[in-house]
Amino acid sequence: MRLTQGQLAPIFATTDLYDAAISPHDLKGKKVLLSFYRYASCPFCNLRFHALSQKQQQWRDKGLELVAVFQSPTSSILEYAGKDYSPVRIIPNPDRDLYRLYGVESSWKGFLKGSMQLGTAAKAFKEGFLPGKVEGDMNMIPADFVIDEQGKILIAYYGKDISDHLEIGEIEKVI
């Protein structure tokens, strides 16, 4: 079931890419952008992750923490999305329990529509984000949640296709 603006964000406890504990309680008092991606070698996902990583310090200075969730295991994330140490908290979630908790969905229609985004694909390939092994649901559609300091959802954005995320400008409006 999809989440909506104004709801309390679901609580979870897990570990990040570097085996450090992470839960929403750890981030109380800060706004959080919780972004759900497909798998670690997805070119669209890596293009987006790279764009957000470049904003990380600027946004952290304004009180926004970034947390990324991939449906890949740690080893694949380290191989593709997290080649270098990442200041963005990354959660490997191959069993996809966080995806279910937040209502993140799969869609073959969204897969086909996103696959046709040739401009975005060309940009991803040009920046060196080439496809690799598919892990989990190939047709998982990204989702982004901006959560306030008290754990309430300010924005619940469910992508329309595999390349669709909340616009960076919309994120910056709430920080």
Image (spheres, grey):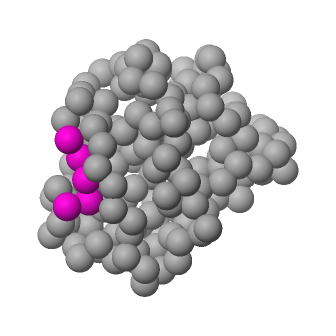
* Side of 29 where 88 appears, left or right: right
For the question of whether residue 167 can be seen, the reply is yes
Foreground of the two, 110 or 152? 152
Measuring 77% from the left and 50% from the top, which residue is drawn there? Answer: 107
Image coordinates of residue 69 in percent, x first then y, are 43, 43
Numbered disc total: 0
Foreground of the two, 11 or 43? 11
Image coordinates of residue 157 in percent, x first then y, are 55, 66
* Side of 138 where 85 appears, left or right: left
Image coordinates of residue 40 in percent, x first then y, are 51, 28
Q: Quadrant of the C terminus?
A: bottom left
* Side of 31 where 153 appears, left or right: right
For the question of whether residue 88 can be seen, the reply is no
Measuring 29% from the left and 50% from the top, which residue is drawn there? Answer: 13
In the displayed structure, would residue 10 be above or below residue 94? Answer: below
**Does the segment drawn in magenta span residue 132?**
no
Q: Which residues are magenta?
A: 21-25
Q: Quadrant of the N terminus?
A: bottom right
Measuring 39% from the left and 24% from the top, which residue is drawn there? Answer: 74
Measuring 58% from the left and 39% from the top, which residue is drawn there? Answer: 38
In the displayed structure, would residue 11 be above or below residue 138? Answer: below
Image coordinates of residue 45 in percent, x first then y, are 55, 38
